[in-house]
Amino acid sequence: MADLDALDSIFKAYDVRGTVPDQIDADLCRRIGAAFARFAATAEGADRVLVARDMRPSGVELASAFAEGVQRQGLDVVDLGLASTDLVYFASGRHGAPGAMFTASHNPAQYNGIKMCLSGAKPIGEDTGLGEIKHLARIGVDTPPTTPGRVESLDMLEEFAEHVRSFVDTGALAPLRVVADTANGMGGLVVPRVFETLPFDLEVMYGELDGTFPNHPADPIQPENLRDLQSRVRATGADVGLAFDGDADRVFLVDDQGEPLSGSTTTAIVAKGILEKEPGSTILYNLICSKAVPEVIAENGGTPVRTRVGHSFIKAVMAETGAAFGGEHSAHYYFRDNYRADSGSIAALVVLEQISKAGVPLSALRKPFDRYAASGEINTTVDDAAGVIERVAAAYADAEQDRVDGLTVDNGDWWFNLRPSNTEPLLRLNLEAPTREACDAHVAEVRALITDKG
């Protein structure tokens, strides 16, 4: 069995993730399954657990072992089979049951992991149960003297596809040409089913489910992984390109000129679409999103609310405020009517609806939302993250600052956020300014402070 000491390295802030089989193997997953079942039964009286997996070859054995651990605690297992993460969240909400999705999202093929939620897609993070599950897995959970739980299979794909389509007025959709690069991930299963009754001309690139990722990594936040999609959009004259990550809960968009949209721009476009249907709604955005996002929300009659980075924080604030939608710069898009969970497919359809209604290409539609120049996330390895943050804060003592998540400094016409990584000795810098030249100059200025050894 993988060493129990590996639990400390594979249990992250929001999920479990590591390499197979040295960090994660079947025996360890059996222990984690038992721990999760005990936690869910204690926390909310759960009597069954939904289990699904992505297309990674290791997922078959690992998910089966996890299910055995659940059954040994006397809970039933509902096997959803191959699924996207947003399908699992939907199933958790629709059936009122906790869920576990075996995926390592955008990570390379040698990785696998588990995203877990309580019933209603309620998030489980480091401070909301993941730490307790890790503890139970470490000490081992005694099998109670009960009959093992049963296993049943459930196909939720068509019901999920109908749910995704319910977020748009299908009668208002134009016959757009769409290219979707699913990167051999779960989008290859889900996206065609979502689109099959819609008036779009859909072409799927790398639609074969293959967890060895033979074409390119399923990590669309990296520009090099968008190149095939950009080329195909340009070559075919497509209206939109969609790039999904491995478990298809995130999507990045490419316009008709083959130019990518940032997660902030997509957040702003989706926010506008939501506000057209729910005037005056509260809309959430995380604190590394462009300033354009709260501006667009306010201009369209909504109430913008800024949150920390991370799905557990966004979902908690969504529950508190009743917000209709929330977006992250990393291309996670959360919908109140999707059990407050994120979905790449829903976000994609809302943008396609906006293009259809506007009657202009995405390259034109996006212009009012693209207002500033952004650095993207820049990671720097540091020995003392807290000390560096204090040094940078002191250098900008005259600017407006907050510590909601790391350090945010607002200098009026430009701003930046500096956050420590949850798992590595890194500082993450995100900076925005009015022009590319100003952005690059300010990045150099702040990075000099970060790396200053004096």
Image: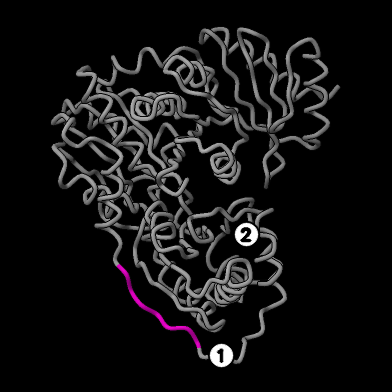
Tell me where residue 349 sits by quadrant: top left
Image quadrant in which you'd find residue 141? bottom right
Q: How many marks?
A: 2
- Give the distance between the C-alpha atoms of the residues marked 2 and 1, in whole angstroms: 30 Å
Disc 2 to disc 1: CB gap under 8 Å: no
At horizontal 57% and vertical 16% (from top left) the residue drawn is 432
Is residue 185 covered in magenta? no
Which percent across, then down, holds residue 49? 48, 70
Q: Please state which amino acid type lies under the numbered disc 2.
A: Ile
Determine the secondary structure under disc 1.
Answer: loop
Question: What is the span of residues highlighted in magenta in the rendered image?
Answer: 148-154
Task: Tell me the residue that label 1 is attached to.
Answer: 146
**Amino acid on which the number 1 mark rests in the picture:** Thr
Mark number displayed over residue 10: 2
Q: Nearer the viewer, residue 60 or 150?
A: 150
In the drawing, does residue 174 fall left or right of residue 385?
left
Q: Residues within 10 Å of mark 1 (few under 14, many from 20)?
A: few
